């Protein structure tokens, strides 16, 4: 079995697709109101959360497609690190994401950091681009 057809490669591809899909839902909720999340009503696209929504929607779509996965995942990993430090961590709960609501940010950060290092895995347009 070649490395491109190995079980870990399929697992990585599935991780990329699911993480990208869940991330694009965050961006879609912020920018398009789909699904509707009342907290994002009236959100300015030029606010910090609006810009995060753009990164999440565009980055999520690119990850689902597996296009420019390493670069996109690296940028999104940084976004999630930023989200954790700015939006969740405080001096008293810095190492306690369970208490500060930052669990998703931490997990997304490290999932995307892994994809940035490991590549896009199976079912990615990157694989077609790299063959040319």
Image (tube, rainbow, N blue to C red):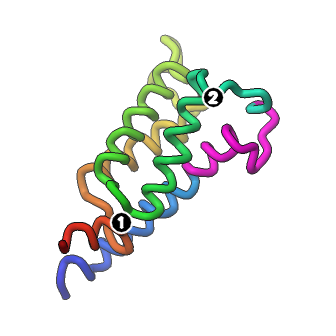
- Among the two numbered marks 2 and 1 on one chain, the one whose residue lies closer to the N terminus: 1
Q: Residue at x 29, y 51 (%)?
A: 70
Q: Residue at x 18, y 72 (%)?
A: 132
Relative depth, front residue between 108 and 131: 131
> Residue 58 — which label?
none
Judge whether 130 appears above or below 40 on screen: below
Q: Main secondary structure of the magenta part?
A: helix
| Residue position for label 1 | 12
* Residue in the picture at 74% in, 32% down: 40
Q: Is residue 51 magenta?
A: no
Q: Secondary structure at mark 2?
A: loop
Q: Furthest residue to the top?
A: 91
Say few, some or many: other residues with alpha carbon within 10 Å of mark 1 (under 14 / 14 to 19 / 20 or more): some
Q: Which residue is mark 2?
A: 45
Real-space Cα distance between discs 2 and 1?
A: 32 Å
- Where disc 1 sits, the SS reads helix
Q: Which residues, given as a range, are shown in magenta?
A: 23-39
As drawn, 70 above or below 49: below
Q: Nearer the viewer, residue 99 or 126?
A: 126
Residue 38, percent from left and from top: 81, 35
Residue 51's spot in the image, x, y percent?
54, 30
Check residue 32 for magenta coloring: yes
Q: Which quarter of the image is occupied by the N terminus?
A: bottom left
Q: Is residue 2 above or below residue 108?
A: below
Instruction: Report whether 65 appears left or right of 118.
Output: right
């Amino acid at each position: 079995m070649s490395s491109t057809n190995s079980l870990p490669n399929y697992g990585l591809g599935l991780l990329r697709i699911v993480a990208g899909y869940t991330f694009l839902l965050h961006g879609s909720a912020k920018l398009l109101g789909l699904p509707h999340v009342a907290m994002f009503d009236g959100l300015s696209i030029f606010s910090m959360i609006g810009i995060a929504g753009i990164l999440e929607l565009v980055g999520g779509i690119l990850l689902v497609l597996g296009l420019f996965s390493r670069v996109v995942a690296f940028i999104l990993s940084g976004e999630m690190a930023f989200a954790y430090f700015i939006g969740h961590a405080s001096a008293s709960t810095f190492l306690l994401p369970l208490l500060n609501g930052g669990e998703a940010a931490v997990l997304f950060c490290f999932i995307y950091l892994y994809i940035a290092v490991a590549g896009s895995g199976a079912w990615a347009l990157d694989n077609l681009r790299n063959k040319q």
